[in-house]
Image (cartoon, rainbow, N blue to C red):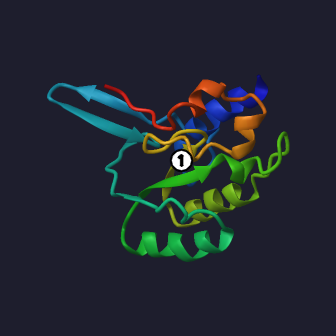
């Protein structure tokens, strides 16, 4: 159950990560005023100048060291970053946040906000992003894997 809670709320918590400590910050929110709505981050209006990394662009610390300074020089302040669950739990029950922590640290240094796209199970309608062991250890019902590997909404 703790793993399920961590898997559900970790991306949300990291998505609001700021270049400074989370504890002292108010949660980003929408301020609905007469005639306009503003995104408020760190107590101030915030305009997202966003970018998105490719599916395999956030797998190593070296990639963070190379990519994030380039993003900062391009005046991008928010990046959608893919995160494969197998990267954080490479072995069943053993968690390793070293690479993710490095990305967060480097993003803070570059004053970039990260929004994590977790490849916990489905991406672009396909289930091929779920860690292979989930298919065999009962985390995902067998019916997800057969007869189709495509998930879509009408």
- Residue 153 in percent (x, y) is at 36, 27
- Rendering quarter of residue 43: top left
Count the labels in the image. 1
- Residue underneath mark 1: 116
Taking depth in this image into account, of 129 and 67 the one nearest to the observer is 129
Q: Secondary structure at mark 1?
A: strand
- Residue 65 in percent (x, y) is at 60, 74
Q: Is residue 40 left or right of residue 101?
A: left
- Asked if residue 24 shows in the view, the reply is no
Q: Is residue 151 left or right of residue 22?
A: left
- Residue 11 in percent (x, y) is at 59, 40
Which corner quadrant holds the C terminus?
top left
Taking depth in this image into account, of 119 and 80 the one nearest to the observer is 119
- Residue 32 in percent (x, y) is at 27, 26
Q: Residues within 10 Å of mark 1 (few under 14, many from 20)?
A: many
Residue depicted at x 31% and y 50%: 47
- Give the residue at the far left of this rendering: 35
- Give the residue at the far front of this rendering: 147
- Rendering quarter of residue 4: top right
The correct choice, above or below, for 146 with respect to 101 in the image is above
- Asked if residue 31 shows in the view, the reply is yes
The correct choice, above or below, for 100 with respect to 142 in the image is below
The correct choice, above or below, for 41 with respect to 48 in the image is above
Residue depicted at x 84% and y 39%: 93
Which corner quadrant holds the N terminus?
top right
Residue depicted at x 46% and y 37%: 150
Residue depicted at x 76% and y 58%: 98
């Amino acid at each position: 159950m703790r793993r399920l809670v961590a898997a559900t709320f970790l991306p949300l918590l990291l998505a609001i990560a700021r270049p400074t400590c989370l504890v002292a910050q108010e949660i980003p929110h929408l301020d609905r005023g007469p005639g306009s709505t503003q995104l408020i981050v760190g107590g101030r209006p915030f305009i997202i100048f966003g970018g998105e990394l490719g599916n395999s662009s956030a797998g190593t610390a070296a990639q963070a060291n190379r990519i994030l300074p380039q993003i900062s020089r391009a005046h991008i302040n928010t990046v959608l970053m893919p995160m494969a669950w197998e990267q954080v739990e490479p072995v069943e029950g053993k968690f390793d946040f070293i690479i993710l922590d490095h990305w967060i640290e480097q993003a803070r240094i570059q004053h970039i906000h990260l929004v994590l796209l977790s490849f916990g199970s489905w991406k672009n309608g396909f289930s091929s992003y779920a860690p292979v062991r989930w298919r065999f250890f009962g985390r995902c019902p067998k019916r997800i894997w057969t007869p189709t590997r495509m998930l879509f909404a009408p």
